Image (cartoon, rainbow, N blue to C red):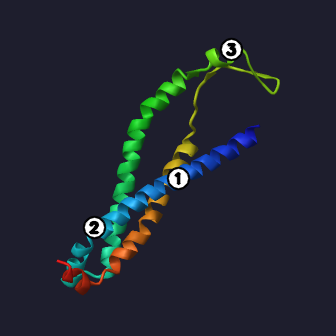
Amino acid sequence: MIAMDKSSNYISQLLIGLLVAAGIFNTLLMSVLERKREFGIMMAVGMSPVTLFRLIVIESLFLAVLGLAVGVLLSTPWYAYLSQTGLDFSSTFGEGLNVGGMLLDPVFKVKLYAESVVAILSAVLGLSLLSGLYPAWRAGRVPPVESLKTL
């Protein structure tokens, strides 16, 4: 039962991570496509494609760090509440919740381990940086002459 719970937890975390990466990928790609002219001008005045690539990767890093900071700030009060008070399911399950011959407390409390926090934050940061690589590569390939023609 514990192994099944852990594996389903890993699968749901992977799906949530992919959704986060897709959201960041979409945000960065739209940002790059909207600023195509700006990137063309920057390259026309001498910026190298590698420098432009680095610029977008740094933007992706800032977006990831800011998103992680806001996420931690918003989720900390909820975690504190759920770890202290918990969710009371006694009205749903009654006073005795019996699972596989084992009596469980109807008040479910959450517990988060430090290694889990580090793993989750690292995975989200890594996925954010990976999702920013294609938009950064795309920004570095903007042809300056063609982007200036559309001004």
Label 3 vs 1, first from the N-terminus: 1
Label 2 vs 3, first from the N-terminus: 2
Q: Amino acid at mark 3?
A: Gly
How far apart are labels 1 and 2 at the CA level? 26 Å
Residue 22 image position (x, y, % from top left): 47, 58
Q: Amino acid at mark 2?
A: Glu
Label 2: state its secondary structure.
Answer: helix
Residue in the picture at 45% in, 64% down = 131
Tell me the residue that label 1 is attached to. 17
Asked if labels 2 and 1 touch by Cβ distance under 8 angstroms, the answer is no
Does residue 123 show up? no
Label 1 vs 2, first from the N-terminus: 1
Label 3: state its secondary structure.
Answer: loop
Residue 27 image position (x, y, % from top left): 36, 59
How far apart are labels 2 and 3 at the CA level? 56 Å
In which quadrant will I find the C terminus?
bottom left
Instruction: Report whether 96 appears left or right of 70.
Output: right
Tell me the residue that label 2 is attached to. 34
Tell me: residue 46, above or below residue 97.
below
Q: Would you call the spot at circle 2 few (<14 residues within 10 Å), some (14-19), or many (20 or more)? A: few
Q: Would you call the spot at circle 3 few (<14 residues within 10 Å), some (14-19), or many (20 or more)? A: few
How far apart are labels 3 and 1 at the CA level? 35 Å
* Mark number, residue 94: 3
* Mark number, residue 71: none
In-front residue for pair 104/29:
29
